[in-house]
Amino acid sequence: MLEMSRKCVPYTPVTGALNEMRIALVSSTGIYLDGQEPYLDHNDDTYRVLPGDFNTKNARIKHGHYDSSDAEKDLNAVFPIDRLRELADEGLIKAVSNKHIGFKGASTDLKRQYEYLSPAIAREIEHSQADGVVLTGGCPLCHRVVVAVQREIEAKGIPTVLITVQPQESKIMRPPRAIQPVGHTMGRVLGLAGDAATQRKILHEALKQFEKLNTPGQIIEVNI
């Protein structure tokens, strides 16, 4: 693990246009696919690699520390893969990356999450096609752990942006880039199940952060 004070925020500038970037998703909302092992009920420090073209019908959620009812109906409420694919089809981004990552993030063994899990996920992303990463969180603790993952990815030279609905937790870890959709809640990070329009707007706002020069460590409020 990279030894770095939280006061120091790793930050990788975006040197190209958004429509030249391949984007990956990384989420601590407990997503996994049929055929993969479900997460443990407690202190899970594993992750799941999701192929870029996975079928959302084969996606499952196991977490237990946030209301995942909307996510179980519509994965895009917490993991906006369909919205990302739509934006790729329209040319807003170059493509969806060949690899995404799901994990749980809720653990009392934070040392293990920070020193083992976060660097391992960052290495997976480093060895993918991703030019940028959008991250989402599940429970309050997840919103802290996911920033540890974000910082490790950013330190690998890959720009990132977090969509947080628990800013008081996320800001403890000082995310390189982050937005907070005002009024959104855990399990409905990008909006309600079936609300594709809102999900799309939130994802677009997150992606636009790659084109801005905000101060690292800030969380930008977004009203949709």
Image (cartoon, rainbow, N blue to C red):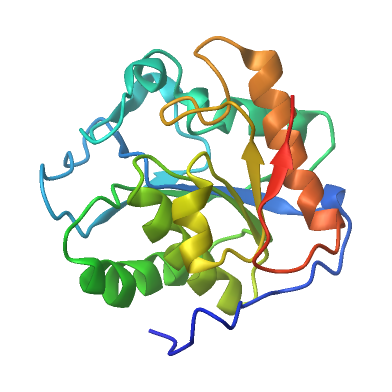
Image check: 162 left or right of 187? right
Quick check: can you spot residue 215? yes
Q: Nearer the viewer, residue 51 or 108?
A: 108
Q: Which residue is pictured at 25% across the width and 50% down the height?
A: 106
Q: Nearer the viewer, residue 97 or 197?
A: 197
Q: Seen from this angle, which residue lies furthest left?
A: 41
Q: Position of residue 194 (x, y in %)?
A: 55, 9
Image check: 208 left or right of 193? right
Position of residue 157 relative to residue 28, above or below, is below
Q: Which residue is pictured at 30% across the width and 34% down the height?
A: 33
Q: Which residue is pictured at 29% across the width and 30% down the height?
A: 61
Position of residue 5 relative to residue 53, above or below, is below
Quick check: can you spot residue 94? no
Position of residue 164 relative to residue 148, above or below, is above
Q: Nearer the viewer, residue 51 or 213?
A: 213
Q: Position of residue 102 (x, y in %)?
A: 37, 46
Q: Seen from this angle, which residue lies furthest front?
A: 168
Image quarter of residue 30: top left
Q: Seen from this angle, which residue lies furthest top?
A: 194
Quarter of the image that includes the C terminus: top right
Q: Which residue is pictured at 30% across the width and 77% down the height?
A: 115
Image check: 189 left or right of 84? left
Q: Position of residue 125 (x, y in %)?
A: 50, 63
Q: Position of residue 178 (x, y in %)?
A: 64, 53
